């Protein structure tokens, strides 16, 4: 039986996409993510603290293959990278949630600014959680626009995000875990935790896909945690 023309066209488009693609991790041609890079995307958890003391577990350091894949997903719109990255995030998220003995916490992504959402067409933390097969609740929204965090030091980042988020509804003591894609200083996690606590939620921890070397090295030196 002949293949319908619509299916033939779709197959041709997929083949053309693959032939034009390069690996998000190493730029090897004709693949979205080569097997060698895929093998490097495995959890190497880091135990971190934000400036206000919130405990955050990052799945991997923001370096090498993981960093290149995250940049391609965020800056180049290559959302196919979200599936392997989401799997890494999901492993650490489920382990952290299992460590919470009192109750099963809600999972709340850090909100995306309107500007970033319009530019990308998707919210990165929510996309990662979907690819991880995780349910999340949009408990936070952006209440004012803040400047780009890149290039700011720790104190400037705290000031930049202060009072930039609000809770979308009131809580009654429910436990919440905050989730973001990349943690640099932890100021964004602290602002999300502040907004949720003000609304009556109990923020128990944060989970990030990756932590920048600057932050993970500082925490490793302070706490004895070994970077993997």
Image (tube, grey):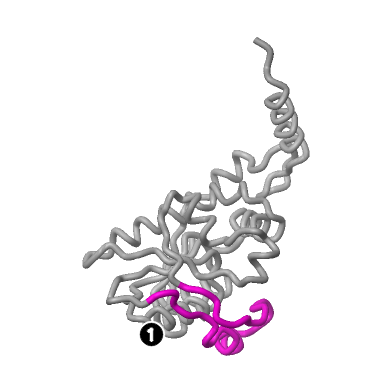
The residue lying at 21 percent from left, 67 percent from top is: 102
Look at the image and give the residue range highlighted in magenta.
140-169
In the displayed structure, would residue 25 be above or below residue 167?
A: above
Report if residue 226 is visible in the image.
no
x and y percent of residue 59 in the render?
47, 60
Query: Of all residues shown, which one is farthest toward the left?
Result: 102
* Mark 1 residue element: helix
x and y percent of residue 185 in the render?
54, 78
Q: Nearer the viewer, residue 64 or 120?
A: 120
**167 to the left or right of 149:** left
x and y percent of residue 104 in the render?
28, 62
How many dots with numbers? 1
In the displayed structure, would residue 46 be above or below residue 129?
A: below
x and y percent of residue 199 in the render?
37, 81
The residue lying at 76 percent from left, 34 percent from top is: 16
Residue to which mark 1 is pinned: 198
Query: Is 154 one of the magenta-colored residues?
Result: yes
Q: Nearer the viewer, residue 206 or 44?
A: 206
The residue lying at 42 percent from left, 79 percent from top is: 193
Q: Residues within 10 Å of mark 1 (few under 14, many from 20)?
A: few
In the displayed structure, would residue 201 be above or below residue 101?
A: below
Report if residue 138 is visible in the image.
yes
Query: Of all residues shown, which one is farthest toward the top?
Result: 1
In the displayed structure, would residue 11 be above or below residue 161?
A: above
């Amino acid at each position: 039986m002949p293949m319908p023309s619509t299916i033939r066209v779709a197959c041709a488009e997929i083949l053309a996409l693959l032939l034009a693609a390069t690996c998000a991790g190493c730029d090897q041609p004709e693949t979205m993510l080569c097997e060698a890079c895929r093998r490097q995307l495995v959890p190497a958890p880091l135990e971190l603290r934000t400036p206000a003391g919130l405990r955050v577990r990052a799945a991997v350091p923001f370096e090498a293959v993981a960093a290149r894949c995250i940049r391609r997903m965020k800056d180049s719109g290559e959302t196919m990278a979200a599936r392997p990255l989401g799997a890494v995030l999901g492993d650490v998220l489920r382990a952290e949630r299992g460590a919470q003995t009192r109750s099963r916490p809600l999972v709340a992504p850090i909100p995306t600014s309107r500007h970033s959402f319009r530019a990308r067409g998707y919210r990165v933390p929510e996309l990662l959680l979907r690819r991880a097969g995780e349910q999340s609740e949009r408990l936070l929204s952006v209440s004012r626009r803040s400047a780009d965090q890149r290039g700011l030091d720790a104190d400037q980042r705290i000031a930049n995000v202060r009072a930039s988020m609000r809770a979308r509804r009131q809580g009654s003591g429910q436990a919440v875990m905050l989730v973001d894609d990349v943690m640099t200083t932890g100021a964004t996690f602290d602002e999300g935790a502040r907004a949720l606590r003000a609304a009556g939620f109990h923020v128990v921890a944060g989970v990030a896909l990756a932590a920048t070397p600057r932050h993970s090295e500082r925490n490793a030196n302070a706490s004895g945690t070994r970077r993997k």
